[in-house]
């Protein structure tokens, strides 16, 4: 098994790169370095891992060493707010990048293509928990870009015989999630670590299903050995927590006496989210291993740069 991994300088991609190499997989990581994660790059450098500077949009014409059996595609812009303001760059980078990656995979004879999708494809849920058969009604250009990526993979799977797997990742968190793309947990912890209260957008009653990046890496590894044609899986904890409860949990674990601050709700922000992960459990043998409180404890112990 030889793996080409795009987005290897990003948050999930970098953790996955190290995770797979540590387990003996032959992995080549690529990234265009337009938005590198410094924490991740330092982590990879300390582990002796290099990331090649390659833009997936240029892959079809790339003269590169062959022999890849698997392609894990994580390269994407992921900021929902930015996608609302600049939809054109999200369709160019995310949809164009996925199309080019798939075309490279077809030409290079890649057998399996694993696509990192998102819970954003569902939009506001009609029912909970959300299973993979739920209607796809995204509320942002980012979410639409992931729907289009899934559809491209389904077409390449059916027409060209590539074994396609979609992992719809819910709210992932973990060490190194920083900068403009930081998730709510990282933002809350960053503020609490400096003695400032978390800022909640809206009334805080909205719920999310959080999953640690380590468990996301496990899910990708399990997908590498799954064979059943085009398949879609939710990757999440299967549990939800309100943003109010999350803020108070982080404050409690920090040992500080703080009260959350509230600001206006953000456009494109869904109200409720909780995944049905029974398909991933049954087909992939996937089971989350780090519960939310333990994951937050670990992050609070992380050294601050």
Image (spheres, grey):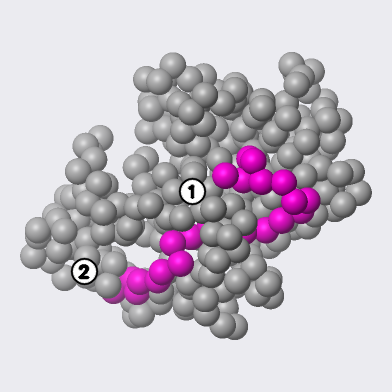
Mark 1 vs mark 2: give the one in front.
1
The C terminus, quarter of image:
top left
Q: Residue 140, image x and y in percent? A: 61, 66
> Mark 2 = which residue?
248
155 or 227, which is in the foreground? 227
Q: Are marks 1 and 2 in contact (CB under 8 Å)?
A: no
Q: Quadrant of residue 208?
A: bottom left
Q: Is residue 40 left or right of residue 129?
A: left
**As displayed, is residue 152 above or below residue 105?**
below
Can residue 302 be seen?
yes
Residue placed at 58% from the left, 60% from the top? 282
Image label count: 2
Residue 77 is marked as: none
Magenta residue span: 222-244
Q: Secondary structure at mark 1?
A: helix
129 or 107, which is in the foreground? 129
**As displayed, is residue 185 above or below residue 16?**
below
The N terminus, quarter of image:
top right
Which residue lies most toward the right here? 159
Q: Is residue 281 left or right of residue 183?
A: right
> Mark 1 = which residue?
216
- Binning the other alpha carbons within 10 Å of mark 1 as few (below 14), some (14 to 19) or many (20 upward) gives many
Residue placed at 77% from the left, 45% from the top? 163
Residue placed at 22% from the left, 61% from the top? 250
**Residue 234 is a magenta residue:** yes
Q: Residue 246, image x and y in percent? A: 29, 67
**As displayed, is residue 110 above or below residue 127?**
above
Q: Residue 268, image x and y in percent? A: 54, 71
**Residue 140 is a magenta residue:** no
């Amino acid at each position: 098994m030889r793996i080409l991994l795009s987005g290897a300088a990003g948050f999930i991609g970098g953790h996955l790169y190290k995770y797979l190499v540590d387990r003996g997989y032959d992995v080549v990581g690529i990234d265009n370095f337009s938005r590198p994660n410094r924490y991740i790059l330092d982590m990879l450098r300390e582990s002796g891992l290099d990331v090649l500077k390659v833009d997936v949009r240029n892959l079809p014409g790339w003269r590169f060493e062959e022999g890849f059996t698997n392609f894990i595609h994580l390269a994407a812009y992921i900021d929902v707010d930015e996608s609302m303001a600049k939809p054109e760059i999200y369709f160019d980078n995310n949809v164009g990048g996925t199309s080019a990656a798939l075309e490279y995979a077809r030409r290079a004879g890649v057998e399996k293509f694993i696509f990192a999708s998102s819970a954003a494809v569902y939009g506001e849920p009609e029912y909970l928990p959300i299973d993979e058969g739920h209607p796809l009604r995204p509320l942002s250009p980012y979410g639409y870009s992931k729907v289009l990526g899934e559809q491209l993979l389904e077409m390449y799977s059916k027409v060209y015989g590539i074994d396609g797997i979609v992992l719809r990742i819910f709210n992932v968190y973990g060490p190194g999630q920083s900068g403009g793309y930081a998730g709510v947990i990282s933002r809350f912890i960053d503020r609490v670590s400096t003695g400032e209260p978390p800022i909640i957008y809206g009334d805080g009653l909205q719920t999310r299903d959080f999953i640690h990046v380590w468990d996301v890496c496990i899910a990708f590894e399990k997908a590498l050995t799954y064979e059943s044609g085009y398949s879609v899986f939710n990757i999440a904890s299967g549990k939800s927590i309100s943003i109010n409860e999350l803020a108070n949990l982080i404050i409690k674990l920090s040992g500080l006496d703080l009260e959350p601050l509230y600001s206006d709700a953000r456009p494109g922000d869904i109200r409720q989210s909780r995944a049905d992960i029974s398909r991933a459990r049954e087909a992939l043998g996937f089971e989350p291993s780090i519960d939310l409180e333990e994951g937050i404890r670990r992050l609070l112990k992380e050294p601050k740069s």
